[in-house]
Amino acid sequence: MTTQALAAPAPRLGHDTVPLPRLVAAELRWIFRRPRTLAVLGLLALIPIVIGVGLTLVSQGDVGTGPSDSGAALVGAAVNNALVLPIAAMVMTLTLLLPLASAMAGADAIAGEAAHGTLRGWLIAPVSRGRLLAVKAFGVATVSVVAVLAMCVTGVATGLIINGTGGLFTLSGTTLSLVDALGRILLAAAWIVLQLWAVGAVALAVSSFTEHPMLVVASVLAGNIVFTILGFLTSLNWLHPFLLTQNWTLAPAEVLQDPMSSTMLGEGALRAVCYIVVGLSIAYARLTTRDG
């Protein structure tokens, strides 16, 4: 056997030589070791507890229930109602804090690593751009799921401790069993998670164009605020079906009705899926042409 034959390089195994579970595990470890991520998740978990304790100290007449503020109306309905409490807490934070968690995760996923110089290692590693985006998107989606589940767990626990299982009734006055109530809460939580995935997809798209994570967070949150303002303008009714934030404070309340409606839930879910597809498509198109 010749020396040249002994020195022959080993055959390449293809572009994706790193196992996907290893990439996902590394990404999740990186995400949940960030102090700011843990701080936001901890804050979100505390919000239902604060609302529940606060409602025990006030009478129902002291809580705003005006029709123009559906978030306050839900909080008023959460008095002595363990079913409404976690949903009301999620609806209130859906306007800012929950999107902030998804936007931060999306900003750190690409722009944050580009700012620290670690993204270039991903781009030159034996990992395809599509697999890289899939791992990053999975990490952002995981943060959204953990944030919503944390609020659900603390909200349900707080409601049951304060009001007991006898406080599980819909806005229509129908009393539910614990299993039925948990099912409705999880349905609302799943819908909210889908909206946060849409926010995360937009954040990934913006993140792929910049190396400044704060710019991504500011852009996404500013977009949410602009969408909310546009949703109040009746002269722009033709635009409302295209706004991601449309009916964010109204749709989750459908699970609290009896019989339960699904009109706004279905429209919101379809809208979120469209934003996810568009956001991830833009991010992929950018990553495939990015060198560092």
Image (cartoon, rainbow, N blue to C red):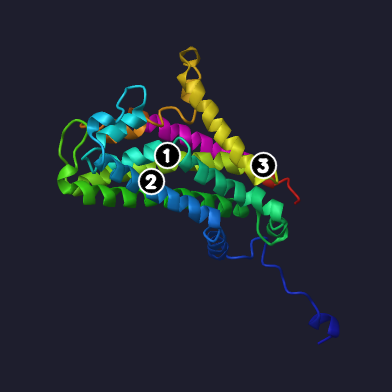
- Verify whether residue 183 appears in magenta: no
* Vertical order, 113 against 167 (above or below): below
The residue type indicated by label 1 comes to: Thr
Residue extending furthest top? 235
Checking the image for residue 177, the label placed there is none
Residue shown at 51% from the left, 45% from the top: 102
Q: Residues within 10 Å of mark 1 (few under 14, many from 20)?
A: some
Nearer-the-camera pick, 54 or 83: 54
Residue shown at 60% from the left, 38% from the top: 218
Residue 280 shows up from this direction: no
Nearer-the-camera pick, 238 or 44: 44
Is 19 left, or right, of 79 in this rendering?
Answer: right
The residue type indicated by label 3 comes to: Ala
Q: CA distance from mark 2 to mark 3?
A: 38 Å
Checking the image for residue 47, the label placed there is 2
Give the labeled residue for mark 3. Answer: 285
Q: Secondary structure at mark 3?
A: helix
Is 222 left, or right, of 6 in this rendering?
Answer: left
Is 58 left, or right, of 114 in this rendering?
Answer: left
Magenta highlight range: 265-282
